[in-house]
Amino acid sequence: MKFAIVVNVSRETALELARKLIIWFKERNIEYVFETQSAEKLRIEKFEPIEELYKHCDAFISLGGDGTLLFTSHFAVTKPVIGVNVGYLGFLTEFTQGEMLGAIEKVLNGTYSIHTRLQLEASVPVNREVQKFRALNDVVIEKGTYPRIPTFVIKLDGELLSSYRADGIIIATSTGSTAYSMSAGGPIIAPKSCVFVITPICPHMLTVRPIVISDDKVIEVSVDSPDGEFPLNCDGHFRKFLAPQEVVVVQKSSEVINLVANESRNYCEILRTKLLWGREHNFGL
């Protein structure tokens, strides 16, 4: 088995963890390769472009926070990803630094389990072709530097849902419900729920609220504005500027992400730990 390793090179803790992992792999004659930027920082000769890793590797290891895991998952395709938390919040990264080696051993032994996560696919015309972008967490259309409050027109399966005057629109998966959508007032949704949530950012009217829809819906979003350009972001990465009236089609992607599961944790524990729920009560825990 061969592992692909992606490191958050801005965190010294992640780099040190990668150095320990290299020693552990060498002692056991386990094959590994780093993505290019990680290898350059660590001065390692075993590297390949991240776009090529899924072709030659059986599993991925992400050393960083949720952002690193999101980045890794885009290039892992369907290969299992071990997320090791070297960040702060860590909703997606299942394993602590101390649990990393145990998780790798389970993958080597074939005794691991998988959390399968759905993705979004955003389709938009680019140079007379339809370009598609995937997102594990969310697709976001924002006002950017536009000086006024634009109107976002949203359709579901071709039927008009509403026109929102807002600073932006977030379309999130259940996985992404604890990311940008939550900070904008959206609901927390259990990861395996087959739904998406549409969350307006700073809507102009108090009656506008997030809406949860079935994940088999096709969502169309456009910006009704006389001028301006509006950023389209997928998982926090800028993809392109949208022109007024340009339509983005968002729907469930046919490609899923396979995250190696930490069987010693459960979702309720994650919410209590990460969001500090119930800290004013002991509950005997």
Image (cartoon, rainbow, N blue to C red):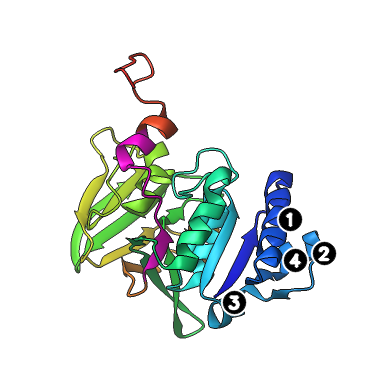
Query: Mark 4 highlights which residue?
Result: 39
**What's the amino acid at mark 4?**
Ala
Lower sequence index among marks 3 and 2: 2
- Residue segment shown in magenta: 256-271
Instruction: Using the image as rendered, state which of residue 117 and residue 231 is in the foreground.
Output: 117
Instruction: Using the image as rendered, state which of residue 122 and residue 179 is in the foreground.
Output: 179
Q: Is residue 147 above or below residue 275?
A: below
Query: Mark 1 highlights which residue?
Result: 19
Question: Distance from label 4 to label 3 (Cα)?
Answer: 13 Å
Query: Measured from the top left, where is residue 249 in percent x and y?
Result: 34, 69
- Can you see residue 9? no
Quick one: quadrant of the C terminus?
top left
Lower sequence index among marks 1 and 4: 1
Check contact, mark 2 vs mark 4: CB within 8 A. Answer: yes
Query: Measured from the top left, where is residue 253 in percent x and y?
Result: 34, 71
**What's the amino acid at mark 3?**
Leu
